[in-house]
């Protein structure tokens, strides 16, 4: 069954301001708190809440607080892994936000949180699609192409890292003898489907999960998987990737998993723009070739299709879950969304299952 998401007042940090100011004065060596404000509701992720804060010297930072809700976006989210992974990636010159402190004491701001740098830049919108309107449409064709190139180059840099060289014990522990990381992903989404949908499962999602299990990949190469790889989770300065953000579903998987996610979400964005790609946006073949050139290695097309099915399945559940926990979305609106021939992730998943997209 579905219940209403958290109320707006749950995001009010005013009652925690004094404690947070004291915390800042200690951690930033007397550089006291001046301002604390939430990012707009539309910009806030549901896995974690994001706030700006400014110190006396004018420096700005981001506070990311573990979400306070009985109806989370994710199941069994590993909030601390977000912090650890970004710290490890930043230490290896990957474009992510620099992290400063992780705080477990929930009395400071009401839940665990971490602090990271504020990066000035712009993020492509999800709604309306960045292929339809917004600042990306105002760039010239070469700049639009450079957004693609810089994004996929950054993604390839993540995948070039050997996860064994990083302090990622929490991610490695998800697998065990006889239970691979691929098994973990399938098991996670079966449980997520049951947790989120209860006694009203999507038959197509069940079918796709069965297909993934029957065609599971053996001995796949593991890399750090961003999890939600897409332009809408990237900060740009001009046409250059400044930071990859939102690491709340990070895990280990084959590199093709993130690429499939990026391509599929971009494909859905094009569809939501009446199937009109930006004039300078790279074609799917060009996007794949750009990634391969940046990584210095050809992708496995079978793995790419496998993880495209995976992405289609996960997007169905994410969009449905987001609608279900949104206070302003009724059950009728949610059902209409899932049935819409343009926006429906269910229709996209059926297409992916019946035909390879690339």
Image (spheres, grey):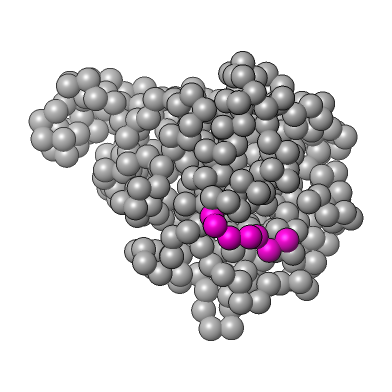
In reply to whether residue 298 is colored magenta, the answer given is yes
Q: Is residue 239 above or below residue 163?
A: above
Of 19 and 292, the residue lying toward us: 292
Q: Is residue 322 left or right of residue 346?
A: left
- Answer with the quarter of the image where residue 134 lies: top right
Residue at image x 26%, y 43%?
100
Q: Is residue 139 above or below residue 44?
A: above
Q: Is residue 90 visible?
A: yes
Where does residue 241 sit, x and y in percent of width and height? 48, 35
Q: Which residues are magenta?
A: 295-301
Q: Is residue 234 left or right of residue 26?
A: right
- Answer with the quarter of the image where residue 340 lies: top right
User: Which SS type dominates the magenta stretch?
Assistant: loop
Q: Residue furthest left?
A: 30
Q: Residue furthest top?
A: 138
Of 17 and 166, the residue lying toward us: 166
Residue at image x 14%, y 28%?
31
Residue at image x 41%, y 42%?
95
Where does residue 87 sit, x and y in percent of width and height? 33, 50
Q: Is residue 261 above or below residue 139?
A: below
Where does residue 159 sit, x and y in percent of width and height? 50, 57
Of 287 and 109, the residue lying toward us: 287
- Answer with the quarter of the image where residue 12 lies: top left
Q: Is residue 225 visible?
A: no
Total number of numbered discs in the rendering: 0
Where does residue 111 sit, x and y in percent of width and height? 36, 43
Residue at image x 32%, y 38%?
116
Q: Is residue 162 above or below residue 81?
A: below
């Amino acid at each position: 069954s579905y219940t209403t998401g958290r109320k707006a007042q749950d995001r009010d940090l005013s009652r925690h301001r004094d404690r947070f100011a004291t915390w800042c004065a200690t951690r930033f060596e007397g550089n006291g708190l001046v301002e604390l404000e939430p990012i707009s509701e539309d910009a806030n992720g549901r896995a974690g809440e994001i706030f700006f804060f400014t110190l006396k010297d004018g420096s700005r930072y981001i506070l990311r607080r573990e979400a306070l809700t009985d109806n989370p976006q994710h199941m069994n989210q590993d909030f601390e892994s977000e912090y650890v992974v970004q710290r490890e990636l930043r230490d290896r010159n990957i474009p992510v936000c620099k992290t400063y402190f992780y705080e477990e004491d929930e009395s400071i701001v009401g839940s665990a949180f971490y602090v990271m740098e504020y990066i000035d830049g712009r993020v492509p919108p999800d709604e309306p699609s960045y292929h339809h309107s917004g600042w990306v449409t105002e760039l010239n064709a070469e700049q639009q192409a450079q957004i693609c190139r810089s994004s996929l180059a950054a993604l390839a840099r993540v995948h070039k890292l050997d996860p064994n060289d990083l302090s990622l014990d929490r991610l490695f522990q998800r697998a065990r003898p006889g239970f691979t990381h691929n098994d973990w992903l399938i098991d996670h989404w079966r449980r997520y489907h049951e947790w989120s949908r209860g006694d009203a499962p999507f038959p197509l999602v069940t079918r796709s999960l069965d297909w993934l299990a029957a065609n599971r990949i053996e001995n796949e190469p593991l890399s750090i998987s961003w999890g939600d790889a897409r332009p809408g989770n990237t900060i740009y300065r001009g046409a250059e990737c400044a930071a990859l953000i939102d690491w709340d579903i990070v895990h280990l998987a084959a590199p093709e998993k993130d690429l499939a996610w990026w391509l599929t979400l971009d494909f859905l964005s094009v569809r939501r723009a009446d199937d009109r790609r930006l004039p300078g946006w790279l074609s799917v073949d060009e996007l794949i070739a750009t990634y391969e050139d940046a990584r210095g290695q050809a992708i496995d097309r079978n793995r790419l299709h496998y993880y495209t099915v995976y992405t289609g399945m996960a997007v169905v559940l994410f969009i449905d879950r987001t609608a279900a926990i949104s206070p302003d979305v009724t059950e009728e609106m949610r059902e209409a969304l899932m049935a819409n021939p343009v926006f429906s992730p269910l229709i996209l998943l059926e297409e992916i299952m019946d035909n390879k997209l690339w």
